[in-house]
Amino acid sequence: MEVFQNLFSILKTIQVRDVIDIIAIALIIFGLFRLIRETRAIQLLKGILLLLLIYFISSVFELVMLSSLLRVFFEASVIIIAIIFQPEIRKALEQMGRNNTWRRAVSAITKPRQNDDLTLAVKKSIVDAADTSVIFSRSRTGALIVFERQTMLSDIAATGTVINADTSVALFGNIFYNKAPLHDGASIIRGGKLHAAGCILPLTDNPNVDINLGTRHRAALGISEISDAVVLIVSEETGVVSLAIGGSLIRNLKREKLIKKLNQLLLDETDEEEKTRKFRRGRDKQ
């Protein structure tokens, strides 16, 4: 009874802000574990926990030198953890920056409505890329086209050749011709224009990627993991057309489906059939 009375007296002192504080910390811890769960960082975390256990044992058995050394290590743990988990911290911050919910809210306040000329240019680049993918699929010509969105890819563009030209099937054909100097790299589309070509993309380090995927697909997945870019890939071996978004692949896309998907991703356009389906779902819930 005394234990319950003490517990009840503690609960009485808890205020709403304390509950919010606890929930916030719990969500941060959950988010961190979710972030590192399937990465190499989980092994590093296990190593740190092992060092904590060794430190506890050395303190209990009064192992002065070992406990002193580990104490110095843990005193500098903030800097050490920042260095060790730098890729994971960077990835978490990038994901926060790419969060659609707050970004759309800010855009609605700070950004004017999308320019009609820009929309037309983006639509033209989508159709040109889709038409190119059909031709390349038949001829087994490899291609890698990156559609830039909110995350600017100027550092990636700097690894290639800046072009800043209107897109066309002929231009893509010249760039990805297998004897052309820029054919091995990626082309970056910015604002409906071909911004740069021959760019080098970072490869994915996801160990679960299909071993049958080549360098072109791994590069597409890599850039889609560290940015919000949409990447169009045409396989040189099979002619299969795919899209890489957020570290995932959508494969075997035909021209119409590819155009529809790119319009949805780049212009937030939903076809009438999808709009009708969403309206019916909302009406049925009511």
Image (cartoon, grey):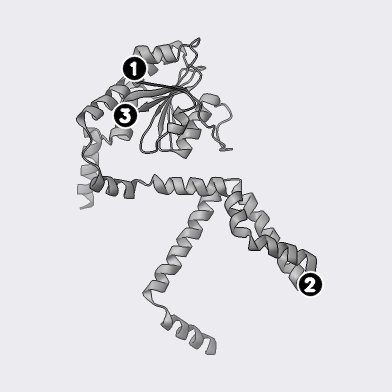
Q: Position of residue 140 (x, y in %)?
A: 47, 13
Rendered position, 60 above or below 102: below
Q: Tell me the residue that label 2 is attached to.
A: 62
Rendered position, 270 above or below 31: above
Local crowd at mark 3 within 10 Å, few (<14), some, or many (≥20)?
A: some
Q: Residue 122 or 284: which is nearer the viewer?
A: 122
Nearer the N terminus, badge 3 or badge 2? 2
Name the residue: 25% across, 29% down. Answer: 118
Rendered position, 43 above or below 168: below
Residue 38 appears anywhere in the view:
no
Q: CA distance from mark 2 to mark 1?
A: 73 Å
Which type of secondary structure does the marked residue at label 2 adopt?
Answer: loop
Q: Are marks 2 and 1 in contact (CB under 8 Å)?
A: no
In the rendered structure, find residue 191 and report the number of the disc placed on it. Answer: 3
Q: Amino acid at mark 3?
A: Gly
Q: Position of residue 122 (x, y in %)?
A: 29, 27
